[in-house]
Image (tube, rainbow, N blue to C red):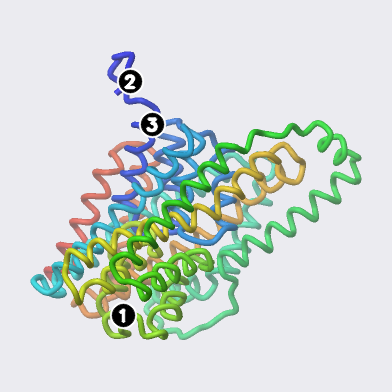
């Protein structure tokens, strides 16, 4: 609590409460959590302003690794400093990792029933997450001013570039028309990189025409980068400590696996789903994890729980590495794998954040902050379409059927959006009701 005794939580306490909330409700992972974090830290708690959060979002999108933990780390660094950055990043990942390790440990006793229950509840929770995506998109476009039509055009093009197949397939499924379609698409990272290149070129040309580029650079003031480098060192130490645990408990093979976990985190672009392919190449194809257990146990559990898929899958790989010896060793290596993956991706992102902060007043950087937002909105539309596709797939083996689930999800999204925009019902209450309703409906039928 605040040492002044006025009953208000301290800034750090408020930050960690917000991060913990996102970690628990953060279904959808990756880009889907951008508006969730925005709502908790920017709108509800006022810990970050819009421009700062936009910078964090850009850095998280252009660096490898788990986007939510990088956003948490950036928030922690901005609010209080390097140590809080590490705590915030770990706290963001912890609920999903604890759930993953717990379900894997209990899978022999509970069987597939526990995973199925979480999967059914995730349909309603996904609908609520989409409501937050819509709220974020509306907020961005409401602030566009005279640029609103440019924002709309950029959003539509970005959505089709990354999720054209998912959007068209979803529309066909809503009409009950089976459609097999594979349109060319950009990954999230490719979209962001292309958008940044276009924005930079336009901004540079504009600065030269107006003769403002050099004056802006002359007026630019360097910032103290020490906190950024200290946070980088702490995250690198966290990853190294996790690798050390692997080496102590499993010798040379453990050292190799720990190093591979770190390497997989810093070479993973394109979101959580892309990391499943990376993990397959690093661990399954190399014979370190069995293909059957990876795809029938670990991946379904990781997808059914909140939080970044990269960290959950990494923790699961650590668990499987120790499972043959004992549950205690498996849980220890799972926790060490969380430290490795969180530490590795944040150690890469923090220096980029520091350099971005130093250049934030440059004309090019200001243009990026202005025009990257509708690009992210387009990405979020593609994410929403994919989430609805996943929800439909959940219902394939039930009596409800995918088409009914899609229409029910859209009706629920419409109602919850109305309630959300009008602030008529607390968000957590809507989330709980949506999850319970989908669990009950899909279980009953």
The residue drawn where x is 48% and y is 35% is: 81
Q: Which residue is mark 3?
A: 12
The foreground one among 158 and 266 is 266
Task: State which quarter of the image contains the C terminus.
Answer: bottom left
Report the disc number at residue 295: 1
Q: Which residue is mark 2?
A: 2
Is residue 65 found left or right of 332 in the rendered image?
A: right
Under tag 1, what secondary structure? helix
The residue drawn where x is 82% and y is 38% is: 217
The residue drawn where x is 69% and y is 57% is: 196
Proximity of marks 1 and 2: CB atoms separated by less than 8 Å: no
Under tag 2, what secondary structure? loop
Proximity of marks 2 and 3: CB atoms separated by less than 8 Å: no
The residues tagged by marks 2 and 3 sit, at their Cα atoms, a distance apart of 10 Å
The residues tagged by marks 3 and 1 sit, at their Cα atoms, a distance apart of 39 Å
Task: State which quarter of the image contains the N terminus.
Answer: top left
């Amino acid at each position: 609590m605040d040492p002044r005794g006025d009953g208000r939580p301290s800034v750090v306490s408020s930050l960690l409460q917000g991060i913990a909330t996102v970690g628990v409700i953060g279904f959808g992972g990756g880009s889907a959590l951008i508006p969730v974090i925005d709502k908790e830290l920017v709108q509800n708690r006022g810990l970050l302003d819009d421009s700062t959060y936009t910078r964090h979002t850009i850095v998280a999108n252009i660096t490898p690794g788990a986007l939510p933990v990088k956003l948490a780390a950036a928030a922690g660094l901005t609010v209080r400093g390097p140590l809080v950055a590490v705590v915030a990043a770990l706290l963001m990942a912890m609920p999903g990792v604890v759930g993953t390790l717990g379900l894997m440990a209990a899978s022999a006793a509970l069987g597939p029933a526990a995973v199925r229950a979480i999967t059914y509840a995730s349909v309603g929770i996904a609908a609520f997450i989409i409501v937050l995506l819509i709220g974020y998109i509306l907020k961005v476009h409401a602030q566009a001013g005279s640029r609103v039509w440019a924002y709309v055009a950029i959003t539509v093009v970005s959505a089709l570039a990354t999720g054209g197949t998912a959007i068209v397939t979803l529309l066909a499924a809503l009409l009950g028309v089976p459609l097999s379609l594979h349109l060319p698409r950009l990954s999230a990272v490719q979209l962001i990189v292309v958008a940044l290149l276009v924005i930079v070129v336009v901004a540079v040309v504009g600065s030269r025409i107006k003769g403002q580029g050099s004056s802006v650079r002359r007026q630019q003031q360097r910032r103290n980068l020490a906190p950024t480098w200290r946070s980088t060192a702490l995250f690198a130490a966290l990853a190294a400590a996790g690798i050390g645990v692997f080496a102590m408990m499993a010798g040379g093979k453990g050292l190799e696996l720990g190093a591979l976990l770190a390497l997989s985190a810093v070479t993973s672009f394109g979101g959580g789903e892309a990391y499943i392919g990376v993990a397959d190449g690093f661990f399954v194809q190399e014979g370190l994890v069995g293909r059957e257990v990876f795809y029938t146990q670990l991946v379904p559990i990781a997808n059914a729980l909140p939080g970044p898929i990269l960290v959950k899958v990494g923790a699961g790989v650590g668990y499987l590495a120790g499972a043959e010896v004992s549950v205690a060793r498996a849980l220890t290596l799972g926790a060490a794998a969380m430290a490795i993956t969180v530490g590795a991706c944040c150690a890469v992102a923090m220096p980029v954040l520091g350099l971005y902060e130093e250049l934030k007043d440059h004309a090019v950087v200001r243009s990026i902050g202005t025009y990257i937002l509708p690009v992210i909105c387009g990405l979020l539309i593609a994410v929403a379409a994919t989430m609805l596709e996943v929800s439909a797939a959940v219902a394939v083996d039930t009596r409800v059927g995918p088409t009914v689930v899609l229409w029910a999800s859209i009706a629920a999204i419409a109602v919850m959006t109305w309630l959300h925009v009008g602030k008529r019902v607390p968000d957590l209450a809507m989330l709980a009701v949506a999850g319970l309703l989908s669990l009950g409906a899909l279980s009953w039928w």
